[in-house]
Image: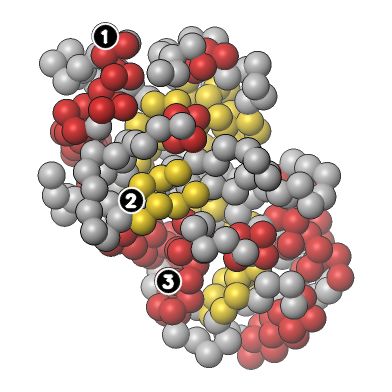
Amino acid sequence: MKFDRIFEVSTEAELLSLSLEVFAYQFKNSPVYRTFCEYLGKNPACVRRIEDIPFLPIELFKTKEIKTRTSADEVCFKSSGTTGSQVSKHYVADPQIYRNSFIKGFHKFYGPISDYCLLALLPSYLERQDSSLIYMVRDLIEQSGHPKSGFYLDDYELLARTLKELDKQGTPVLLIGVSFALFDLADRYPMSLVNTIVMETGGMKGRREEMIRNELHDHLKKSWGLREIHSEYGMTEMLSQAYARRSGIFYSPSWMRVLIRDPEDPLQILDTENTGGINVIDLANLYSCSFIATQDLGKLYPDGGFEVLGRFDHSDVRGCNLMLI
């Protein structure tokens, strides 16, 4: 199956048609996904709606090889984890699909990356060369082409100086960072930023006491005189990203869709404005699995935007665990 049409989805009818086609392809070619679907009594002959497609529990990326094909170009992205813990492994047969997804997705929400100077503050990720986030940001930095674009690791003083200089010059800047690092930078170097977009990728990664997103955003806005803090929603097991440009409400590109499942009955999809588990359709995951039941809690709004409200704890995901194979 070719991926050409994935990024051309523009209507609900096209999303449904392509989702059913991808489901049939992955059912046929992914042994893990097929076994999971058969356990639930689901197959392409009886699935006619997006809501009826089985969503694979994300935990299976830690214990199974989830793929529909292999290739000489295959890369394996791994999630972060504590020493000795299991990590997710996402086998990507065609990295070009990932590049198409993050380039087209970024362009949809922010325009050409060449319009920006991209500053990356991702110390906990940069230590790992198998991070999908680092892969994406490194590629975007190269495409930016600005001489100041780059990773700044723990050099907060240089980064703060660069931010002030670029902002004063009127250069459009995108500062993307992991939450704890942005918090530390804002603590040490308060300043007024006018031409800078600050985007957090989520997670304090054990470096600071966990805080809710609103608290983090309030701290960053106060320190840097910003009206909004942007957020990126992505994960190792996905090849697409959703972005929140204001009020913590995320929006997805047309080939990605979020549904909300009942916390007590993971096979039941809830109506909008109900809180439950986040299920993700990511058609860019063509050669792994495009239908994932995450461990995130969220709420979906009528316009397609969604909010991430937290995560299930171990006991809360029991409904999904019952379906693990």
Marks 3,2: beta carbons within 8 A: no
Residue with the mark numbered 2: 92
Where on the picture, by quarter, is residue 48? Answer: top left
Tag 2, which secondary structure? strand
Residue type at mark 1? Gly
Task: Report which residue position mark 3 lands on.
Answer: 139
Element at label 3: helix
Q: Which residue is mark 1?
A: 41
Which image quarter holds the N terminus? top left
The numbered dot on residue 17 is none
Indicate which label's residue lies in the foreground, 3 or 2.
2
Q: Is residue 72 above or below residue 267?
A: below
Instruction: Tell us which disc is closer to us: 2 or 1.
Output: 2
Please, what is the three-letter code of the amino acid marked with disc 3?
Answer: Asp
Which residue is rendered at x = 27% and y = 60% of the image?
A: 73
Left or right, residue 244 beside residue 37: right
Q: Position of residue 149 (x, y in %)?
A: 55, 81
- Helix, strand or loop at mark 1: loop
Q: Residue at left 54%, top 47%?
A: 79
Q: In whole angstroms, how far apart are the C-alphas of marks 3 and 2?
A: 16 Å
Q: Residues within 10 Å of mark 2 (few under 14, many from 20)?
A: many
Inter-mark Cα distance, 3 to 1: 42 Å
Q: Quadrant of the C terminus?
A: top left
Give the residue drawn at x 64%, y 49%.
Answer: 202
- Which circle's residue, 3 or 1, is located before the other in the chain? 1
